[in-house]
Image (cartoon, rainbow, N blue to C red):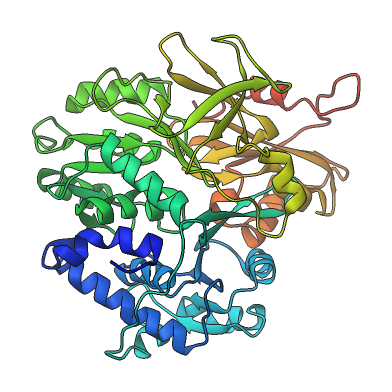
Amino acid sequence: MSDNYLFSRLTAFGASTPNKAFATQPDTDAQSFGTTLNNALRLAAVLQNAGLKPGDRVAVQVEKSLTAIELYLATVAAGGIFLPLNTAYTASELSYFLTDAAPAIVVCDPAREAEIVPLANAAHVFTLDKNGQGSLTAALTEAVITPVARSADDLAAILYTSGTTGRSKGAMLSHDNLYSNAAALKEHWRFTSEDVLIHALPIFHTHGLFVATNIALVSGATLHFLKSFSPDQIIAALPTATSLMGVPTFYTRLLQDARLTPQLCATMRLFVSGSAPMLVDTHEQWQARTGHTILERYGMTETNMNTSNPYDGARRPGTVGMPLPGVELRIMDNAQDVAQGDIGTIEVRGPNVFKGYWQMPEKTAEELRPDGWFITGDLGQIDADGYVSIVGRGKDLIITGGFNVYPKELESLIDDIDGVLESAVIGLPHPDFGEAVVAVVVPSNPALTAEAVKAVATEKLAKFKQPKQILLLPELPRNTMGKVQKKALRDTYANLFT
C-alpha cells in the first residue's frame, strides 16, 4: 500500500481484486477495478508530464465518463487537488473559479476549449469529451506513476459553494475528510462487494463524486454507470442492481412510470435520497409502489455526509436521521445549546468537516469555530428519539434538483437589468425539483417584461439557477426596518407549483 493516504485507501480493494467489475455501462463491456486503477496511474503520469506538482489544482469541467472518474483518482495519486466544476457554468462564472483557484491544469470539453483557454491564466489545458476521449487521453502512454506521498491532512479536493454575497467559496477537503466519510457510509449503509449501485448522479458534486463513487471503491461494489438520469435506463438496471442513490427528482419521475413495481425492485436493498428535501408524499408513494422505504440523509459540500436515517429501524419521512458514527451534531442559538425539540442553527464536528475556505481566512473564522464545530447555516431541530429535521435555511439558500442556488447572485444580475428597480429571489416548493427558483421583480419601467428578465438569466446563468417563474410586482413587502420580507413572499406564493 502506498503512502498516498486517500489513493491507497480508495484503491485497496481494487488492488487486491483487480478482475472484479468496477463499472458496467449500457451497451459496453464491464471495466474492471484493475483497469480503472491502471488507467488512473497512467493519467497521473500525463498530469505530471504537464507540470503538475503536489498541491497544484486540477480544474475539471467535463461531461460524465469513466475517464473523468479516473482523472479524479489520477489527480489524487499525483498529489494534486481535484477541482470539479458544474458543466452548466458559463464563461463568466468559470472565469472567477479559474482565477481564484489558479489551477496548474484545466480539463474541459473540446467544444469549449477556445472559450476556456483565454480564461485559464496560462494553465495547461487538456480536453476530454463525453466518451472519455480528447487531448488528455491522446497524451497517454503505458507509463504509470508511483502515487505521491500525501498525509491524511493534505488537501484532496476543493469544491466551490457559492457565498450568499454572490462570491463563491472554495471548500478545502482533505484526504481524511473524504476517506473517513466513505468508510463511515460503507459501514452504515452496509455496502459490500456484492452490491451493484446505480450511478446516475453528476460527478461535479459531492453526492455523485464522493458519496457514490468513493463508497463503491472502498467496498468493492460495482457501479452501473449512467451518463445522466434516464427513467428508461434506471428501469432497465433495477432488476440486476441492489442500490440507487438519487435526489428527490429521481424518485418523483420514476413514480410517474407504470413499470415501477415491487417485482421490478426485487433485488434492491437500498434507495438513498439527498441533496434536497423530499416531500413526505413522495416517501409514502414510493413505499406503496415498491415496498421500499427511501433512506434520507443530510450532507453539505463542506462536510460530505453528516447524518443518515438508520439502515435498520425507522426511516422517518421529513427527517434526515441521526449523526453518522464519528460525527457530532448540535443545535445552537446565540452560541448556546437550545432545548430539545427547539429550532436553532445546526453545527457539526467530525473527521468529515472541511479545513476551511480557500484563500478566505475571515470567512473560515466566521463559520468554523476554533474547536472544530462548523456552523452550517441550516436551521434544524432534534426530536425526542434523536432524529434531526431541517426546518429551514439561514441565508435563504435554495436547493433545486439537488443543486445549491444562492439568491444574492441572481438578484445582483437582475437588479442590473435596464427597467428593473429591485428584485427578490426565493425558493418555492416544487413537486419535481424540491424547490423552484422564482424571481420577484419590481419594474422601474412599465414596459419591462418577464421575458426580458428571462432572456438575461438564460444568457448569464447555468440552467439550474435560472428562475422557473418571474413575477412582476409593484413593490416588495418590507418590515419597519425596511428589510425585504422574503418569508411573506414565500407564504403568498407557496402553492405556485403545487
Percent of width and height locating residue 428: 58, 30
Quarter of the rendering containing residue 183: top left
Q: Is residue 268 left or right of residue 71?
A: left
- Farthest residue, direction right: 481
Can residue 21 be seen? yes
The residue shown at (59%, 49%) is 465
Q: Is residue 227 visible?
A: no
Give the quarter of the image for residue 377: top right
The residue that appears at 55% across and 37% down in the rendered structure is: 436
Residue 106 percent location from the top left of the image? 53, 77
- Residue 413 placement, left or right of 406: right
Q: Is residue 382 left or right of residue 486?
A: left
Q: Total number of numbered labels?
A: 0
- Closer to us: 468 or 307: 307
Instruction: Tell me the residue at 41%/87% (across/down).
Output: 135
Above or below, 56 against 137 in this view is above
Task: Give the camera-side residue of 469 and 407.
Answer: 407
175 or 457: which is nearer to us?
A: 175
Q: Quadrant of the N terminus?
A: bottom left
Q: Position of residue 370 (x, y in %)?
A: 68, 39
Residue 401 in the image, given as x and y percentages of width and height: 47, 42
* Side (left or right) of 294 relative to 317: left
Residue at left offset 50%, top offset 56%:
174
